[in-house]
Image (cartoon, rainbow, N blue to C red):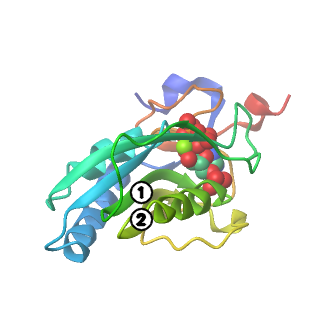
Amino acid sequence: MDTTDMGEKLKDVLVTAEQLDQRLAEMAEEIDRDYAGKEILLVGVLRGAVMVMADLSRKIHTPLEMDWMAVSSYGSGTKSSGVVRILKDLDQDVSGRHVLIVEDIIDSGLTLSWLRTNLLSRGAASVRIATALRKPAAAKVEVEVAYVGFEIPNEFVVGYGLDYAEKYRNLPFVGTLAPHVYEN
Ligand SMILES: O=P(O)(O)OC[C@H]1O[C@H](OP(=O)(O)OP(=O)(O)O)[C@H](O)[C@@H]1O
Ligand SMILES: Nc1nc2[nH]cnc2c(=O)[nH]1
Ligand SMILES: [Mg+2]
């Protein structure tokens, strides 16, 4: 799919599929170096992280297992409510595990700050974060993020797992929506 499939709904392409692929390969190399001799429990945050999880995990050579959590702090709007709800919990016990949380985006940081504390309180040996995208301008909470794909401006983005009202998650690139799509 390319931008023309989105017609006038898309404003700009911020990160291309090729850039994502290349940067995730670099992140995987760093992860392999940092976790040498350990086993990783990758925790994907549904639903946005599905694409990053699938692509990043295939580039990591360190032994790993995958689990998933679903949390929600946004509903169907474009602003974080600040209230994080667990919609689906992990299937695995994280105690003593080296957890690497995989995210598509860190915006306010509220979701990850909450999740990190939550997993540490369950006895994880370590909890680190890998995210494809980060919006630094929007940081309301200080969260330490070990692996960041791309720093992006403070605009609402879609694609590569990120939705607007559940659409556009399947775009292979990250783009911004035209304002008329969500300002009504
Ligand atoms: O840093 P924050 O401001 O907390 O925002 C980041 C979170 O928001 C989005 O998920 P969302 O809750 O929209 O659910 P989804 O992954 O199912 O789309 C995104 O996938 C991150 O998980
Ligand atoms: N789709 C989407 N979800 C988000 N959640 C937090 N920030 C964003 C964003 O820019 N786009
Ligand atoms: Mg999400």
How far is mark 1 from mark 2, CA to CA? 15 Å
- At horizontal 37% and vertical 47% (from top left) the residue drawn is 52
Q: Is residue 171 left or right of residue 81?
A: left
Which residue type does callout 2 highlight?
Gly
**Which quadrant of the view contains residue 6?**
top right
Which residue type does callout 1 highlight?
Ile
Residue 117 position within the rendered picture, expressed as x and y whole percent measured from the top left: 55, 64
Q: Which of 70 and 181 is in front in this view?
A: 70
Q: Residue furthest right?
A: 184
Q: Can residue 12 be seen in this view?
A: no
Does mark 1's beta carbon lie closer than 8 Å to ligand 1? Answer: no
Labelled disc at residue 30: none
- Assign a secondary structure to mark 1: strand
Q: Which of 56 and 129 is in front in this view?
A: 129
Rendered position, 87 above or below 18? above
Labelled disc at residue 101: 1
Q: How crowded is mark 2: few (under 14 residues within 10 Å), some or many (20 or more)?
A: some
Does mark 2's beta carbon lie closer than 8 Å to ligand 1? Answer: no
Earlier in the chain: of badge 1 and badge 2, it is: 1
Residue 147 position within the rendered picture, expressed as x and y whole percent measured from the top left: 40, 68
Q: In this view, does 64 lie to the left or right of 160?
A: left
- At horizontal 60% and vertical 63% (from top left) the residue drawn is 113
Q: Is residue 86 left or right of residue 101?
A: right
Mark 2 highlights which residue?
123
Residue 73 position within the rendered picture, expressed as x and y whole percent measured from the top left: 67, 43
Q: In which quarter of the image is the N terminus?
A: top left
User: Which of the two discs, 1 and 2, sits closer to the camera?
Assistant: 2
Residue 39 position within the rendered picture, expressed as x and y whole percent measured from the top left: 19, 63
